[in-house]
Amino acid sequence: MDTVLYLAHTQSDETLSKGALEALTAAKELTAQLGSANLVVAILGGDVQTAADSVADCGASKFLGVSGEAFAQSRYATDAAAIEALCRTAQPAIVLCGSSSRFNRVLPGVASRLGGCADLHATEVKADGGSTSITRWYYRQRIRAAQVRDKRPWFVALETGSDAPWITAGGKAAVESVPVALPESSLRTTVEGLQKPPGQTQTIRPDADLLYVAGAGWTKKQADGEAHIQDAESIILDFLGKTQASLGGSKSLVDISGTGQAVLSFMTHLNQIGQTGAIPRHPKGLSTCCHGEEPHAVGWRFIHERRAINLDANCGWAHGKADVLYVADAFEVMRKVNALLEKS
Amino acid sequence: MGFHIVVCAGIVPDPLQTLEPITGPQGPALKNEMMLPAVLDPWAKHALFEAAHLAAKTPDSKVWLVSMAPKTKLQQVMMSIAQKASFELVALDGPASGFTDSQAVAEALAAAINAISGLDRKRLLVFGGWESASRGAGATLQIVGERLGIVEQFQGVDELSVTASGSLRILERVEGGMHQISHCDGPPAVLGWATGSLPEPPNNPQVGMANMRTLMPALQKATAAGVAVDGKSFTSVEVPKQRRDTRIVKDASTDDIAREIMEWIKG
Ligand SMILES: Cc1cc2nc3c(=O)[nH]c(=O)nc-3n(C[C@H](O)[C@H](O)[C@H](O)COP(=O)(O)OP(=O)(O)OC[C@H]3O[C@@H](n4cnc5c(N)ncnc54)[C@H](O)[C@@H]3O)c2cc1C
């Protein structure tokens, strides 16, 4: 009987992330599709009991845990040792988890160590007639492929937004603690903590309902022959504050910001959407002052509803890529949207 | 003591090109793949610039660029990249396709790194992009690291600084636009770079001339790298339908547009 190992790590508050709970839905479905498979839950973190309890009623035959101070930190050497130990105990055919920076850093290496294989950034996993397959994208979201693999264990990290999170009342899980032998050399790295981009307002919100994209047009000369960067800043920040939308930018805009010019001080490379930027997932996206082009448009792959405001009725990216293009001045429209939001 | 920095960088089609998948003799491939203009993989290019910058300010350092692609493509791309940063090329004549598996590519890269003469493992930093713009696997560097026995690994790196004691302070991208700050007591380490913080350097003919001395011999002696299929097969490869039926709203008042957007956001 094949084992599907659902792998998760705790967050700093010892809970599981939304992405991790989405992957649990997928793991349960995959186990059911495989017929005779067995679901095992494995969690690593500082203390895993709270997280295990939150999914105690997920139907797993076993709960494995690696916990302790060394595993509270997101660090390759210790994470690799922990996941290796969990896999040697569970002997899984498939290891399924939610995508996270912590797992993305470590899984391919562990898979290789175990003689298996790994696919990060999967958008779907399913089994048909006993055969597991995944869907993922190549060439920065331009080509979609479904693929199967012979090697086991096969690690699959599912992108967030691929499934609904599995949330129940939970219960009390009997967690079997898996020992991990850590050589001293595995502690050569220490994690100091997290840092916000220096002096920046927090503008990236992966769980937001709306992605708000600003293009270089915000910094360009307007009808009166002047650029209005202060206005642009305050309109955008006002909108983000009122909607809690996540902020994206075109490459042209973030590159201008990077040159140290006094433009949109809160915009960094981390905001960039597209081929050489981020490819976020949000139900809706609003693009403003952005002309796009293909390297930008691929960043919108996982944005379901898309609208754009551009002065140019022939805006190349909006045509065929957005649902609605408003041919208008984004300064004027967004000021009015902000006023309406203020009233509502 | 300086660093020995090995940058792993593939080449990818210019992102402005239209890509169309076809089925080739070895599985999926791109239509006219050999004809498409190519560039150095963007995130790996940032890694190369960061490597050159670090080497330039750390005496007794050296940069190697390990790159696998069809020889003719490598030659084209190297001619332009050689103007921007000092490095010694280690060329592998092999596929640049995104459909080749990262495990197989990583094994070829690790073997090439192992074969670099004079490379000091105690001073080794393996750099690359945290993801390629072709395979987008985000896996190759980690496997290279495992093959070389390096378990100090960092991905999505935007900043590396070397402290007075020689330890490495590293900023990695994590969720929500934040960076994780880690300290590693020193090399060897693997760093998969995101954008980093350096602008693209201007062309420097002197650097180009110096690189040329080693570039052509490296290209000439590039050996064919075997890349196994490694148990992966594709059941479908397609460019999904992308065209949306865009409603163009022209000549509406900004009040009406604002109201419509507001309703859509709230709805
Ligand atoms: C190797 C490579 C990689 C790339 N990767 C990326 C990537 O990852 N992400 C990315 O975004 N780009 C990327 N690009 C660049 C991309 O091709 C485009 O050049 C870029 O996205 C254009 O940015 P933009 O639309 O903001 O700027 P512009 O092209 O300058 O467009 C500005 C727009 O603003 C509009 N505008 C101006 N004022 C107003 C107003 N008052 N109201 C409404 N509209 C207004 C104008 O009509 C215009 O359409 C890449 C390019 C290359 C070559």
Image (spheres, grey):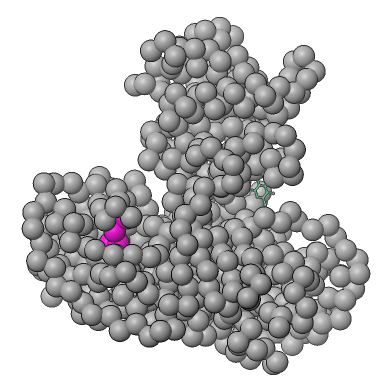
Visible in this render: residue B110? yes
Left or right of B123, for residue B103: left
x then y, percent, for residue B176: 45, 47
Given residues B73 and B67, the one toward you in this image is B67
The image shows residue B191, relative to residue A14, as above or below, that is below
Visible in this render: residue A5? no
Left or right of A214, for residue A172: left
Given residues A175 and B74, the one toward you in this image is A175
- Secondary structure mostly taken by the magenta-highlighted segment of the chain: strand
The image shows residue B4, relative to residue A319, as above or below, that is below
* Quarter where residue B32 is shown: bottom right
Given residues B100 and B142, the one toward you in this image is B142
Left or right of A298, for residue A255: right
Query: Which residue in the rendered view is the most extreme toward the front?
Result: B164
Give the extent of the magenta segment. A6-11
The image shows residue B3, relative to residue A231, as above or below, that is below
x then y, percent, for residue B129: 59, 64
| Residue at left offset 38%, top offset 65% | A73
Q: Quadrant of the image for the C terminus of chain B?
A: top left
x then y, percent, for residue A149: 34, 72
The image shows residue A225, relative to residue B32, as above or below, that is above
| Residue at left offset 88%, top offset 76% | B210
| Residue at left offset 24%, top offset 47% | A165
Q: Ligand 1 lies in which image quarter?
A: top right
x then y, percent, for residue B141: 53, 73
Asked whether B86 falls inside the magenta stretch, the response is no
Q: Quadrant of the image for the N terminus of chain B?
A: bottom right
| Residue at left offset 75%, top offset 74% | B58
Numbered disc total = 0
* Quarter where residue B260 is shown: top left
